[in-house]
Amino acid sequence: MDCQQVQRWLPGYLDGTLPAGARSETHVMIGRHLERCDACRQELQSYQVLSSLMSQVSRPEPPADLSLRIRVAAAQRLSEQPWLHYVRRFRTRSEMVLKNILEPLAIPATGGFTVAFIVFVLVCQLLGLGMPLRAVSNDSPTNLLQPARLESLAPFPVTGMEESGNSGPHGLLVEATVNAQGEAVYYRILAGPDNETIRRQLDLVLLFSRFRPQMSFGRFTAGGHVVLSFSDISVRG
């Protein structure tokens, strides 16, 4: 240890109040340093003289009426600013209520609200998954789940059904799968001719057609299905 460190610890070394964790080791190191350092020994002697002088000083006794004078001064202070007393009392009571009542209730209340919210989300998801994706024509739409539907069909003809023997009002039935952006991403032919010519025409029609996606709890979701009916009517004269 150097002189600066030793002089910093000299008061504690003299009074026996060195830190408890390293008291013995520090005490030994300071003692070894004092054996070979005259400046630090003189500093220690000055502390000893100061301690001896302070021990000889008598302890002053407070006036007998000190407590009475303090109470009178406090009463005068409150009488000059009565609103300050009410503000302090209100703040003290508010702190007591916050610490003893509101804080113990904050954690259970927060936990209960979180659990209730999680249960509500799970129940809504279960109800949404349990409802049918396709609505019957007689059903009235709700805000929870609405099926996808056609908004505008591209004005391209689909021909070639009469040659295959499927003419009529429902010569070709197609089920289209709609994504969340209102686009047909897949389709399959339910009834009618299925050949390369028909599929090229369907690709063109569905590419430029617009659909409204299915809605689940007010949000557009993918996976909606729309059934389209095409007919090929020829007029001979």
Image (spheres, rainbow, N blue to C red):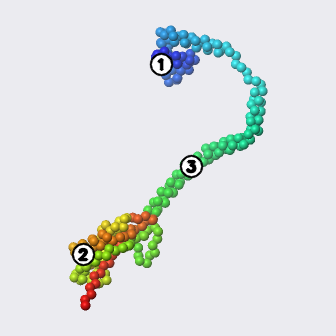
Residue kind at label 1, given as amino acid type: Glu
Horizontal side of 108 relative to 186 (left or right) equals right
Residue kind at label 3, given as amino acid type: Ala
Question: Of callouts 1 and 3, which one flags the residue occurring earlier in the amino acid sequence?
Answer: 1
Q: Residue at x 31, y 83 (%)?
A: 169
- In x, y percent, where is residue 69? 77, 29
Can the viewer see residue 146 in this picture?
yes
Numbered circle sitting on residue 25 = 1
The image shows residue 109, relative to residue 70, as above or below, that is below
Horizontal side of 218 relative to 235 (left or right) equals right
Q: Depth check: give the residue in front, 59 or 78.
A: 78
Comparing labels 2 and 3, the label whose residue is closer to the camera: 2
Question: Do callouts 1 and 3 mark residues in contact (Cβ within 8 Å)?
Answer: no
The image shows residue 30, relative to residue 112, as above or below, that is above
Q: Residue at x 22, y 75 (%)?
A: 197
Can the viewer see residue 133 in this picture?
no
Q: Depth check: give the residue in front, 204 or 223.
A: 204
Q: CA distance from mark 2 to mark 3?
A: 66 Å
Examine the image and state in which quarter residue 171 appears.
Answer: bottom left
- In x, y percent, where is residue 187? 30, 70
Numbered circle sitting on residue 147 = none
* Residue at numbered disc 2: 198
Q: Residues within 10 Å of mark 3 (few under 14, many from 20)?
A: few
Q: CA distance from mark 1 to mark 3?
A: 49 Å
Comparing labels 1 and 3, the label whose residue is closer to the camera: 3
Question: Of callouts 2 and 3, which one flags the residue occurring earlier in the amino acid sequence?
Answer: 3
Residue kind at label 2, given as amino acid type: Ile
* Residue at numbered disc 3: 106
